[in-house]
Structures are given as structure tokens and as C-alpha cells.
Image: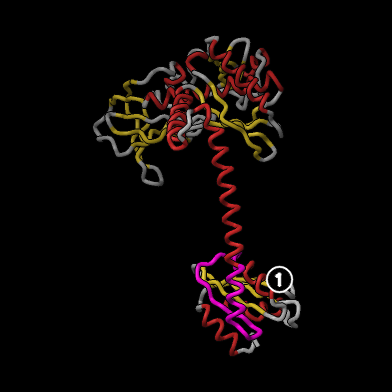
Amino acid sequence: MEHKLFYKDPYISQFSAEVLEQRQDHEDQYFVILSETAFYPTGGGQPYDTGWIDGIRVVKVEEVDGELRHYLEGPLPEDNKAVNCELNWTRRFDHMQQHSGQHILTAAFEQLFGYPTVSFHLGQEKLTIDLNIEELTEEEALLAEKKANQIVRESRMIETKWISPEEVADYPLRKEVSVSEDIRLVIIPDYDYNGCGGTHPKNTAETGPIKILGWEKHRKQIRVEFVCGERVLNQLEKKHEVLQQLTGLLSAPEGELVDAVQKLLEGNNQLKKLQEEAMESLLYYEAKELLDGHSKGVITKVYRDRSIQELQKLAKLVTENEGNKMVVFIAENEDRLQVICASGEKTNRNMKSVIKDILPIINGKGGGSPNFAQGGGAATISGMQLFNQLEENGILR
């Protein structure tokens, strides 16, 4: 542990060290082992640090078989024994803020409602905790957020402490520790006591504000999404930019945006209704035109890039107006052929049987009832070629 500078002082961002080894892993990625390091490796829900070693970028830090491996963008010169190292401090401090914020919010849910956290994930923009419950109310979320931000404002100390297994019972831990040696506690006195190997700021004020963004059900648990510190400002900036764009697009001040959107949706619904009515009228006249142009008992037609829903309505309109007609429509839509078969009540043709005869030709699937059936398959032939085969096989007679 004495070689892990991030445990001595998480605020160390620059240091010098000796290169003990430089090797390549099984994927030929270069990594170095240092005599001591402030680079934090992936662990305990916290991502690795990045930065530079003698100007070469550190892209990943992992602990493998007891070694802290600093993976580099390229190899160090062989004669580099003593190196200067620098952390990407923005990334490190962000992780410190998020990790301490997670402890604070998790403890708030536990203390207020007895809701335990069973897992934690720190992503690039947001972080989540999974609560071992099946429902979370708006009121509960707001109360937990309020409690967490109260702890932040109180600027309470965040302490770390190494203890022996025998000392574990002396602390009111939020959950059992997962290791039996090198036990490290992160403590917010009189609020939260938890086993943790991550890096944290020295007080809760440095965590910055905590904001819950939402929650959802996930595998019989509730996943809460939130941000802390600088990420709250980033989220605010993004949302402010969207609001500014909306105020311009809707010609309404921010406080009236909801009403403006509601009016827009109502107008859109009215337009959709008018569009549907117009489409119904067009389909009616299209059905009449088809009937006027076909004196035979079977009406066939090939369409290209036509909605299958429209063709369904069209087929039904034709057969409802002329009960002695049978309709077969084929739609050529991208790389598929879609077939609709419909018959009037005065015909003696079974559409379920007709579609069963058609679909094998295009290796298709489908089904239906005696009066209406549909299906689709690969467009290995054109719609007209399919009709020709149906005529040759006597399927449409």
C-alpha cells in the first residue's frame, strides 16, 4: 500500500517515479510498472485514471496479479529509468466528486427509507445506483436528494481509515466489507461508514451539488440515474441550450414552453385527424376507380413503396362495395414483396388457402381468415412476375 500514492494523498497530481519494468501484454500493448504511483486503477466501481508519463499518454491503468500496470500509447525509451508523471486531474477530480456523491446519496436512501444500494456504476456522463426495491416515488427521490445536498452544504469531513478484521465490529458499517485484509473505510462522521477503495475529496462540500435525473425499473430493482459536482453544471448547460432553442422555435418565453408545446401537439393531432380523413376519402375514390376499371371477378395490382396499412384498407373497401369481387394486391417495398388477399361475401374463394398457395413462391410467411389474408417474403422476383406465375398456376382463376 505504501507504493499507492492515491491512498496517501488523493490530491497528488504530479510525481516522479522509477520505471521497474516495461513489457507488452498478450495484445502487444505496452505497459510500465512504477516504483510508486498516484494513478488509480479500475476498481470498486471507479474507473482508472489517465494522464502522461514523460509526455507519453497513459490510456489505462489496471491491477493485474498484484501489479499496477500503466498502459501507454507507445513505449518509453529503454533508458528512461526515472520518469515524471502527471494525472489528468480533471478526470480524477470528477471521479472523486461522483464517488463521494454516490456514498452520500446511497446513505440518504438507506437512512430515510431503509433502501439498500446493491450496485453502482460510474459512467462518462452520468452514474447510477441500483436500489433493492421495486418502486420509488417522486416524493422519496426528492427527499433523498434534499438530504444528500444538506450533507454536501454542511461541508462534513470525509475521512479514510485502515482497520484490521477485528476492528470491523467497532463501526456501524452500511454494508459488510467484501475483503478480509487491507480493509479501508471511507467515513463521513455521524452519517456514513463504508468499506471502499476509491478516491474521495477531503470534505462533502467539494462533492458539489447532487441531482437525480430519473429512475427506472431494472431486473426487479430501481436504477437511479444522477450526477454530482461539475457534471450538474454540464447537465444544466445542455438543458439550458435546449430551452434556448425551444424558446426560439416556439416563440415563447421559458415559463410558457409547456403551454406552447401543448398547443402544438393539439394542432398536430387535429392535422393528423384531417390527414386521416383525407386519406380515407382518397382511398374511397381509389377503390371506386379500381371497380370501374375491372369487370372481372379478380382485381389485381402491383404497388411500389406503398404502406401495407393503406392497401389493407383499400382491399376491404373494394370487397365491401362489391361482394362478388376478389382482390390480390402486391406491394414492392425495398427488398420484400408483401401480398394482400381479400374477398367479398358473395365469392366462394377462401383467402387463407389462396395465400398459402402464393407464399411458397417467394419463400414467405403469413396467414389470415377465409375473407382476408396477407403475408410477405423476399423480392426474388418482381410483383408482375409473381402475378404471371399465379396466372400460370391457375391460382387466381
Q: Is residue 312 above or below residue 251?
A: below
- Position of 62 compared to 128: left or right? left
Residue bearing the label numbered 1 = 368
Is residue 254 covered in magenta? no
**Frontmost residue, 302 versus 196:** 302
**Frontmost residue, 276 versus 237:** 276
| Residue drawn where x is 58% and y is 61% of the image | 279
Secondary structure under the numbered disc 1 in the rendered image: strand
Examine the rendering and report whether any part of residue 63 can be seen: no
| Residue drawn where x is 36% and y is 25% of the image | 87
Q: Position of residue 222 (x, y in %)?
A: 66, 34
Type of amino acid under label 1: Gly
| Residue drawn where x is 64% and y is 66% of the image | 313
Q: Which residues are magenta?
A: 284-311
Please identify the quarter of the rendering in which residue 295 is found.
bottom right
Q: Position of residue 112 (x, y in %)?
A: 69, 19
Q: Position of residue 3 (x, y in %)?
A: 42, 22
- Position of 18 compared to 280: left or right? left
